[in-house]
Amino acid sequence: MLKFNWHNISIMVVDDNSFMRSLITSTIRALGIKDVVSVPNATQAIEQLKISKTDPVNAGIGSIDIILSDFVMPDVDGILFLRWTRTNKHAPDRFVPFVMVSGQADEKSVQKSRDAGMTEFLAKPFAAQTMADRILEVIQNPRQFVLAADYFGPDRRRMDRPIKWFEKTSEKGGKTEMVERTDDRRISAPSDLQIVNARSNIKHIRDDVHAVIIRPANRLLDKLGPNVMRGQIDFDPLVIQAAEARIQELVGDYSKWTENYLNTLADCLNKLQKRQEDSRRVLAQINHIAHELRGQGGVFDYPLCTAFGKSLYEATLDVSLAVTGNRLKLIDAHIGAIRTVFNQKITGNGGKVGATLLKEIEAAVKKYS
């Protein structure tokens, strides 16, 4: 295979979960990209990036080529971090490829990230190949940027065609319905747009344009070296295998991490039962752990943990609901199911035992919700 200068690429990984941050960092390095900056929260990432614009030595980082950030983080979450990256005057590179990483990969989360200016979305759990695919996508298929009245970021349309959308309509009696439409929502004609290329001499934006299309230079290709002109850019399959093996090496660490999670969940349940602390805060902690569990399980072939984590996450999403006896039983059922999975090392679908556990959780949700 052609050799590429992967050592020239610099990636920042931002995740408040130290285990997941280590996992992502290890996977990227196993792919051959050694310059990885690991940051525990978005607040620190913003500070480092801000300083790096004028004093990279003091910031401890040089130019960052790709950012991978968790979606759910305390204080400054992935969306706020992304918006800062795209719009703040102190951001060193508003065009930097930004990959949102999350176990919360529903349509609403993806759309929210897209509308804030993300480049790609990586769902947890992920495989080494999936990680490689996202990195290759931002390198090989850079997106043009759009500057409009209420948006700045990569073009949210990957294809030049109308998409389905929904319009609110009101009928007699005040009833509101969502009607599906397929006509093109874009109202700008070509004359309403101004296109700015990387090497153009345009220095001013016309006053009469509705949007500006910006096509920055692909510096990532330049960093990979001259071989990019000779063939398809890809990671060596042996490198992908090595990265997958590195993920599996971390299974032992993951078991210890999950044991700590389960102990914390049991402690939270005990506090709720004894009414020792503010229930909203305790439920928020349970919800956060559930979110982490659903994002991590599938990476290590524990899809049942992902399923139970997702169910517990949904069961504790509304922290304002009263902590009733039924709600406590529902939380306890989830903790017990997750503990069984790890105590018995039930990987994959778990066969009959896994099917039984899934049915028990489904029954508990139906009975206690």
Image: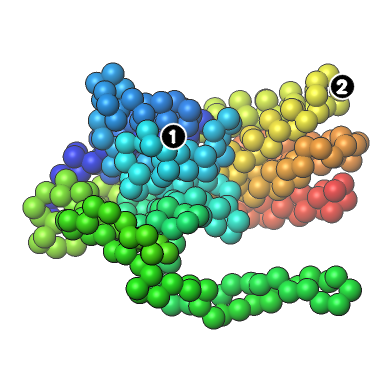
CB contact under 8 Å: marks 2 and 1? no
| Residue under numbered circle 2 | 274
Give the x, y percent position of residue 41: 48, 29
How many marks overall? 2
Give the x, y percent position of residue 9: 23, 41
Note whether 137 is above or below 49 in the view shown: below
Distance of mark 2 from mark 1, alpha carbons? 36 Å
Note whether 79 is above or below 61 in the view shown: below
- Residue 332 picture quarter: top right
Q: Which mark is residue 14?
A: 1
Q: Residue furthest bottom?
A: 183
Which residue occupies 20% across, 49% down?
Answer: 219
Which quadrant is the N terminus positioned in? bottom left
Mark positioned earlier in the residue sequence (2 or 1): 1
Note whether 154 is above or below 284 in the view shown: below
Q: Residue furthest right?
A: 325
Q: Is residue 45 left or right of residue 222?
A: right
